[in-house]
Image (tube, rainbow, N blue to C red):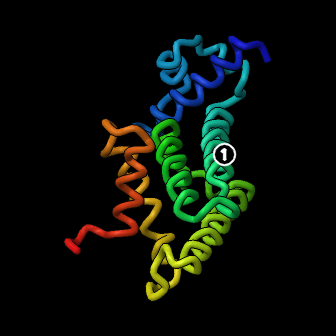
Amino acid sequence: MRADATRNLERVLSTGARLLADDPSVSVAAIAAAAGVDRRTVYRRFASREELLAAVYQARYDAVEEAIAGARLREAPVAVALHLYVEGIIAVNRKWPVETSRMLAEETIRERRQGLIDEVGLFLRRATDDGLLRSDLPPGWVATLLPPLMLHAAEELSELSAAQAADVVVDTLLRGVGVP
């Protein structure tokens, strides 16, 4: 793919994610206009709105997988891996803010999502076994708390870099909000 075509595709997908987060019924024409490309350019690449939506969701999951791989959840020191994971997911949430639950009806998306959840679950067990996380909490509790913390940090701490927002999330996760 030519460099300009690659840039256009990236712009269409990231613009689509942002607009779809605000309005799930946004049109292809509106996405194309906001991305600065002609609607025909989008339709040459995607035969339908559904194909464009699937590509946006695919790009988000690609970014999540890259964030998980970059965090080195299995081999990096636990505290380092936790921070890298949180920082990476905050960056993903900012770039790809679209809600993916709409795509969960598709089996391949469900399986892909479950694989990512399982990978993070294994890491959280490792973090518990290593003593970073409390072992007396109900099973799955940290896995339930962490995604909304990262989402809220991405949205509400927009003045902070992803790394700074990750500092806030990790500190909140590990120390809570009470006074010691």
Q: Nearer the viewer, residue 12 or 120?
A: 120
Residue at the image position 51 percent from the left and 70 percent from the top = 143
- Among the 4 quarters of the image, the one containing residue 72: bottom right
Q: In screen coordinates, is 166 left or right of 35?
A: left
Q: In screen coordinates, is 172 left or right of 42?
A: left
Q: Is label 1 in a helix, a strand or a loop?
A: helix
Count of marks, rendered view: 1
- The residue indicated by pointer 1 is 66
Q: Residue furthest front?
A: 77
Q: Quadrant of the N terminus?
A: top right
Query: Residue 90, how many percent across, how many down?
Result: 47, 47
Query: Residue 38, how many percent across, how many down?
Result: 59, 11
Residue 61 visible = no
Q: In screen coordinates, is 151 left or right of 124?
A: left
Residue at the image position 53 percent from the left and 43 percent from the top = 92
> Residue 102, relative to residue 4: is it above or below?
below
Q: Quadrant of the C terminus?
A: bottom left
> Residue 75, relative to residue 124: is it above or below?
above
Q: In screen coordinates, is 121 left or right of 26?
A: right
Residue at the image position 34 percent from the left and 63 percent from the top = 172
Q: Amino acid at mark 1?
A: Glu
Residue at the image position 47 percent from the left and 19 percent from the top = 34
Q: Nearer the viewer, residue 151 or 31?
A: 151
> Residue 39, relative to residue 90: is it above or below?
above
Q: Nearer the viewer, residue 131 or 95?
A: 131
Query: Residue 15, how many percent across, how many down?
Result: 51, 27
Q: Residue furthest bottom?
A: 136
Residue 162 visible = yes
